[in-house]
Each structure stands twice: as C-alpha cells, then as structure tokens.
Amino acid sequence: MMIPLLTLKAGDVEIVEVQLSRSSHIVKKKIKDLTLPPASIFIAVIRGEEVIIPYGETEFQPEDKVLALVKRTSEPALREML
C-alpha cells in the first residue's frame, strides 16, 4: 500500500512511502537494475532502525520502507512496480 506523506503542489509531486512485502517485484533487486517510471526517484530506504540513502547498488529487502518522490502522473506506474 502506498501512503502519501507530503504533497508539493507547486510541482504536482508527492513524497510517498511503501512497505515492501516478500512478493514485491523489486525485492532482491538493485536500483541500477530497475527501470523507474518517469518523474520518480527513490529518496530513502528505512530498514529496521537504519535510514539508507539509496544509490545504484542498493538492494531492496522484504519489509523495507521505501520513500519516493514522484509526480502524480507517474504514481500509478510506481505503485504497480512496487
């Protein structure tokens, strides 16, 4: 489930949070191997008590909370990906 955390009206963008399940399409994949929807970027991964600034080598794990910045028009594609 995608939870909107903040809406920035000026750019029509949102910061959203998704908790990954074991069945998520991106679990055990690295960011560099993914094709993100247009106008979306991962900004943080919360793993337990640790906050990770994601980069290309970051590999997603089940139960990770992923924060993303996304334009509203790309939100459905990002939701489907996660």
Image: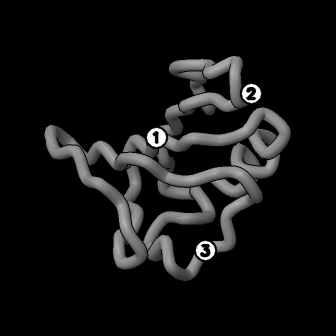
- The local crowd at label 2, few if under 14, some if 14 to 19, many if 20 or more residues have their Cα within 10 Å, is few
Name the residue: 40% across, 41% down.
Answer: 65
Task: Say whether disc 2 or disc 1 marks the residue closer to the N-terminus.
Answer: 2
Q: Residue at x 68, y 31 (%)?
A: 13
Q: According to the image, label 1 marks what residue? A: 67
- Discs 3, 2 touching: Cβ within 8 Å: no
Q: Position of residue 24 (x, y in %)?
A: 58, 57
For the residues labelled 3 and 1, the Cα–Cα distance comes to 16 Å
Tell whether 73 sits left or right of 44: right
Q: Earlier in the sequence, mark 3 or mark 2?
A: 2
Instruction: Estimate the spatial distance between the alpha carbons at disc 2 and disc 1, rounded to whole Å.
Output: 17 Å
Residue at the right extreme of this rendering: 73
Q: Can you see residue 29? A: no
Residue 50 visible somewhere in the drawing: yes
Residue 11: give x, y in percent of width and height: 70, 30
- Secondary structure beneath dot 1 equals strand
Q: Disc 3 to disc 2, how far (Cα)?
A: 24 Å
Q: Quadrant of residue 55?
A: bottom left
In the image, what residue type sits under mark 2? Asp
The number of numbered discs placed on residues in the rendered structure image is 3
Mark 2 or 1, closer to the camera: 2
Residue position for label 2? 12
Helix, strand or loop under label 2: loop
The residue lying at 56 percent from left, 32 percent from top is: 16
Compared with 6, 47 (above or below) is below
- Disc 1 marks a residue whose amino acid type is Leu
**Residue type (three-letter) at the residue carrying disc 3:** Leu
Residue 36: image tag? none
| Labelled disc at residue 34 | 3
